[in-house]
Amino acid sequence: MIAFLTGKDLEKYGLSWMPTLMSDKQMVLPIDTVKYQAQEVVGVLASSRYAAADGVAAVEIDYEPLPVVVNPYKALEAGSTKVRDDKDSNHIWHWEVGDRAATDAVLKNSHTTVREHIYIPRIHVASMETCGIVAKWDAINKHLTLYMTTQAPHAIRTVVALITGHLGLSEENIRVISPDIGGGFGGKVPVYPGYVIATAASVVTGLPVKWIEDRSENLQADSFARDYHMDCELGADKDGRITALRIKTVADHGYTDAAANPSKYPAGMFSICTGSYDFQTAFTEADAAYTNKPPGGVAYRCSFRVTEASHAIERMVDIMAHERGEDPADFRMRNFIKPEQFPYKSALGWEYDSGNYHVALTKAMDLIGYRELRKEQLEKRQRGELMGIGISSFTEIVGAGPSKDFDILGIKMFDSAEIRVHPTGKAIARFGTKSQGQGHETTYAQIIAEELGIPADHIKVEEGDTDTAPYGLGTYASRSTPTAGAAAVMGARKIREKARKIAAHLLEAADDDLIWDTNKFYVKGSPDKSKTIQEIAFAAYTNHPQGMEAGLESTFYYDPPNLTFPFGSYICCVDIDRGTGQVSIRKFVAIDDCGTRINPMIIEGQVHGGLTMAFAPAMMEQIQYDSDGNMYGGTFMDYMVPTAVESPKWITGGTVTPSPHHPIGAKGVGESPNVGGPPAFANAIVDAMWHLGVRHIDIPITADKVWMLLNKHGVALAE
Ligand code: MCN
Ligand code: CUN
């Protein structure tokens, strides 16, 4: 054992609390009260894992139970137990967008209105590897190196510099390295106490210090996602045209707002909740509450609360269609934003760049054989069998910036690429994003190869080292392709323009007389007079024009003019066993549109993974607490992550509607399947049971929930 570190020790350095990304604050180590079960209480430093475990076992803490508040509605009531002594109440913020009065009036006068309370419970990303860090303080050079699992290394470096400046640490002496981190999925965006404790411990002891979570620590104490309680109301006229949407949300943030949203958007991009439909009128508001739970409101492949928004609208549209006795596909087709309406200004303020929703849904319907399945469903229903079909036609919103509206802790959201072409025509490219398994090494190289004609396997892609990579905001919210991917294009084009000048010099021609073709410039009218990019690269270092800077490289910071709006149509077909309530996914078809596709195989991988991560919270995953704030479970015995055995087979396809403002028309895709997926399952299951009187089931839709409903409606088979 080397040392114990307490909140009191950290207080000396002003580090017992730290800022969160939403300008709230979070305990690093507590001094006399803890806020939730499983909160870190003391740091034990030892020279081996075994000694550290003995050290932990030797720690004795006297806990005195204090009143807690676990339910966010209760937390918001006057006189409720206060979670935070430093705050006046448990109400964190109120946020609203849209026209409240107009929405109320339109809903009041609508021919049909449907209402539903929809809850999306807490879930946890459970990536392959947990979070960890090795902090190494070099006292002689006053240099700090942090090898850590972060999705945003540069932002971390700046934050460390800002909060430790008073201790003499300076940004040029901080190096953050994020190697292969075993998956991120948003869970590795926040800063966790373990990182800070390891760093402080290294500075105090002068030794390199490693912290790595075990699985239970990861499940119980890291940031959680969702926990949105949504009251939704949707109206339609007598012809089945949507009139207005209202959603009122209570957001459970645990004891601190540690969400990783852009500053201006406390509820993220939730106002995309009008989805793929043409709304004139809408209003949404949210109130966030403190409760005695770990920090919530962050990650799980979500694009900043878009999963919640998409679940709400896709469930509501389905409920409306059923209420009207109409086929949900026909109802959607009538109400979709039409292709000629793009760029489309939504009632809640977004400008959708491009879309073609009818085609995507038609393609999905053809692929699954929708009309035949409906026929089969009717026949089965007559035999008393339960079969359901669910559609989700979602719209995503990804690619933050634009920096005029988007920042994290004041740092504007753009992204970057730095490309260097070496004399022999090979290249290295570095980015401000950080792949966690999305394959940037492959796709960024492909982008540059396409623009410069250098073979992709001659291009080395690097990310995640703040000493070498250009400044960027990292990888989350499917922003890499819309931002850094665009920077790669623009940077490569800058290089091509310089290459043109060098080629003109070599070919003794005017710049304007040169034509670019795949990997070379040739002289207009004489295609045999040409210089390849490799010849040009060599000349950039050996024979460049007098007066021109040597070398062939560029740095580009790309600030997107708008977000990108990928979309898709998913259809799920289920059978339900009346004896057990077991739902089996018979078929699942996913049509995704992410604009121009850079690498279809990588996209398919993203979609397969994302659909599995949509299936998980729809059918299995959930973090629950009892009324005293004790977490049920906290291991993989209780938190059900699907394996290959449970996961359905995915049938995927796509359409291509390029983004008009991205330099190659690409939109993000990394989170689409996860954002669009859950309501497809829920809609299918409710569809199977609607005729029994079931209107809505909150996810996860487990067999016991289904069986209870079957039993309640008198159709469960009992042996
Ligand atoms: N791509 C493409 N053509 C497009 C769009 C994307 O070929 N039109 C490729 C990209 O070049 C990239 C990949 O698809 O290689 C994903 O790109 P993009 O949609 O831009 O998303 P990001 O790279 O920004 O990845 C983030 C996204 C998020 S936010 C989560 S959460 C998530 C996800 O990616 N976490 C993942 N997918 C993951 N996949 C793995 N293996 N591990 C994670 O932690
Ligand atoms: Cu919201 S999970 Mo991804 O944005 O890292």
Image (cartoon, rainbow, N blue to C red):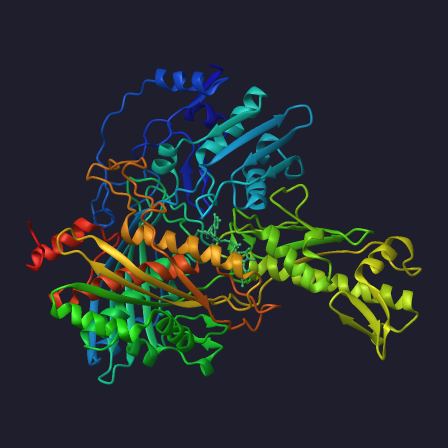
Q: Can residue 131 be seen in this view?
A: yes
The x and y percentages for residue 419 are 71, 54
**460 is higher (above) or lower (below) than 18:** below
| Residue at position x 45%, y 43% in the image | 20
| Residue at position x 73%, y 58% in the image | 454
The x and y percentages for residue 607 are 44, 58
**543 is higher (above) or lower (below) than 349:** above
**Which residue is more in the foreground, 491 or 427?**
427
Image position of 227 (left or right of 400): left
**Which residue is more in the foreground, 327 or 160?**
327
Image position of 711 (left or right of 280): left
State which quadrant residue 716 falls in: bottom left
**278 is higher (above) or lower (below) than 292:** below
State which quadrant residue 639 falls in: top left
Image position of 226 (left or right of 471): left
The x and y percentages for residue 701 are 23, 53
| Residue at position x 56%, y 73% in the image | 660
Count of numbered circles in the view: 0
- Most extreme residue toward the bottom is 239
The x and y percentages for residue 492 are 71, 61
**80 is higher (above) or lower (below) than 116:** above
Q: Can residue 95 be seen in this view?
A: no
